[in-house]
Image (cartoon, helix red, strand yellow):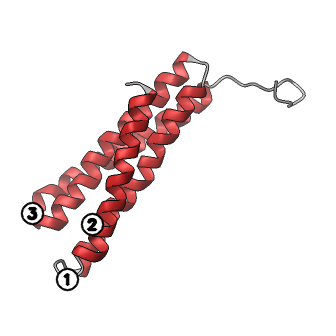
Amino acid sequence: MSSRALIMIASMSGLISVSLGAFAAHGLKNTLSPYLIGVFETGVTYQFIHTLGILLCALLATVSSGKIAQKAFHRAAICFIIGILFFSGSLYALALTGVKWFGPVTPMGGVMFLVGWGYLAYAGYQMADNTTQDGVNQ
């Protein structure tokens, strides 16, 4: 997946995050219990945080000169996307429908978030070091 596509996905995910946050704050307050609103808002929070992660990965992949680092940044972003779909998506579905079946899906999304952060660390390790022995940037 290209950095351009990841930036577009991150932008749409950010738009959706803000919209769902407003929906939770204004549209659901008289419909759902405080507990379920909290579940929904947790989904929004994690979606927004990992949306920023997708954007960061896309931008770092663009400026990185190493192919291994670029691929790792892209893989991290893809893990974040899958994590959002599974983690946040299952929390939204659980809060809105009350169907408990969605609960076991949530940890799979959490694992994808963890794998994504691992890929991001690996990508950072693989980036070319642009400093000299004196510690000055080249």
Which label sits in the foreground, 1 or 3? 1
Q: Disc 1 versus disc 2: distance between alpha carbons?
A: 14 Å
Q: Disc 2 versus disc 3: distance between alpha carbons?
A: 13 Å
Residue 51 percent location from the top left of the image: 42, 48
Answer above or below: position of 98 versus 60. Answer: below
Check disc 1 and give the amino acid type.
Answer: Asn
Please give left or right for residue 74 compared with residue 108 in the image: right
Determine which residue is flagged by label 2: 40
Q: Nearer the viewer, residue 107 or 64?
A: 64
How many numbered dots are placed on residues in this image? 3
Residue 54 percent location from the top left of the image: 44, 41
Residue 30: mark in rendering: 1
Task: Please give the name of the residue rendered at 22% of the width and 60% of the height, measured from the top-left corner.
Answer: 92
Determine which residue is flagged by label 3: 99
Residue 94: mark in rendering: none
Q: Nearer the viewer, residue 137 or 59?
A: 59
Quadrant where the N terminus is found in the figure: top left
